[in-house]
Amino acid sequence: MNAPLPLPVVEPLDRSLRDVLSRIIDAKTKPQGSLGMLELLARQIGMIQQSTRPTIERPAMIVFAADHGVVHEGVSPYPQAVTSQMVANFLSGGAAINAISRVCGLTLEVVNAGVATPLAPLPGLVDAPIGPGTRNFAHERAMSREQAFAALRAGAARVRHHAALGTNVIGFGEMGIGNTSSAACLMSRLCGVPIDECVGRGTGLDNAGLARKRNVLASALELHRDAVEPLDVLAAFGGFEIAMMVGAYLAAGEAKMTILVDGFIATAALLVADALAPAVRGYCVFAHLSNEAGHRRMLDYFGGKPLLALDMRLGEGTGAALALPVLRAAVAFLNEMASFESAGVAGREA
């Protein structure tokens, strides 16, 4: 019997302040629209917080790590052991997400969602594995529905922990060798896009490796052709870190946080969350355009405009973290920039 899924309830974004915020923004000492996407971002954050003077409080980044059974099909040039090694690197402060989080001012948390290699009890690790990696979805479903439910609940619990500490801006990153394969299958099935348009080189496949990856994933999609409902798609192809991100997105929307969406894998997780609760996209800021194949197509699916385009494809939440200073700038101009009236500056003549 399937376990019940207590999904967080995500209310539609309250747009009642939209016109008020637009008038405040248009009255600033600048030509209307001259701050471009910064103006749209300031208005979105104001609507999320239901305030004409929004703030950014205790921004956090949660990196979920897990392994994927499909890696045994040769879909990645890196061995599975790299996942656990990178978790140790995160915890020792030596990864890109550590450096970028420090310079951008994010609290960083690392969660073991299901790493295959046993992890030492390292300081700072939230150890909540659903299992020692998923099964090989080239031959069977990656996880059971019960495991998917457990991962959703665990991801939601981490966001609620940060909400209780005052966080109102949050981003999600991931680490898991093989997880671009999982994300590509999620994208193909949920967006109705041919797998060849979803598959990229991931961590650096050569041409032969890329062809093999495409063949493996095409066969897996045919094997699980009956998986069409969002949770069934997640169970068939997802990773435990991706499933935890789905629960995290839903809980962040429920808590009315501003959500920084990272790259290809994080956006694939959002596809599942959006299918379960479409209102969640109103709380999302698409931080950057990944250089991974398929990400632009996913952004188009959401109608999302990325804040940054730096040819990045690392994951870990790095692109999301880099967008935080842009959010700070949007809030700062809304709160601190003078209006034409307050500055005694002549406005545009009619």
Image (cartoon, rainbow, N blue to C red):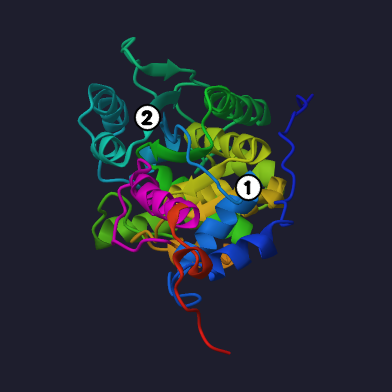
| Magenta stretch: includes residue 312 | yes
What type is the residue that disc 2 sits on? Answer: Leu
Q: Is residue 139 visible?
A: yes
Tell me whether the residue at label 2 lies in contact with that at label 1, contact meaning CB atoms closer than 8 angstroms: no
**232 and 241: which one is in front?**
241
Q: Quadrant of the C terminus?
A: bottom right
**13 and 132: which one is in front?**
13
| Quadrant in the rendering for residue 160 | top right
Q: Position of residue 223 (x, y in %)?
A: 59, 49
Disc 2 element: strand
User: Which residue lies at the image location 41% right of the left edge and 31% below the top edge?
Assistant: 67
Q: Position of residue 128 (x, y in %)?
A: 49, 18
Q: Earlier in the sequence, mark 2 or mark 1?
A: 1
| Magenta stretch: includes residue 73 | no
* Gap between marks 2 and 1 measured at Cα: 27 Å
Quick one: label 1, few (<14), some, or many (20+) residues within 10 Å?
Answer: some
Which residue is the site of mark 1?
51
Which region of the structure is painted magenta?
307-335
Q: Residue furthest top?
A: 121
Give the left or right position of residue 18, taking residue 240 as reference. Answer: right
**154 and 81: which one is in front?**
154
Q: Main secondary structure of the magenta part?
A: helix
Q: Residue furthest bottom?
A: 350
* Residue 108: assigned label: 2
What type is the residue that disc 1 sits on? Answer: Ser
Number of marks:
2
User: Which residue lies at the image location 79% right of the left edge and 24% below the top edge?
Assistant: 1
| Quadrant in the rendering for residue 80 | top left
Q: Position of residue 127 (x, y in %)?
A: 44, 16
Foreground disc of the pair 2, 1: 1
* Residue 39: assigned label: none
User: Which residue lies at the image location 52% right of the left edge and 68% below the top edge?
Assistant: 341
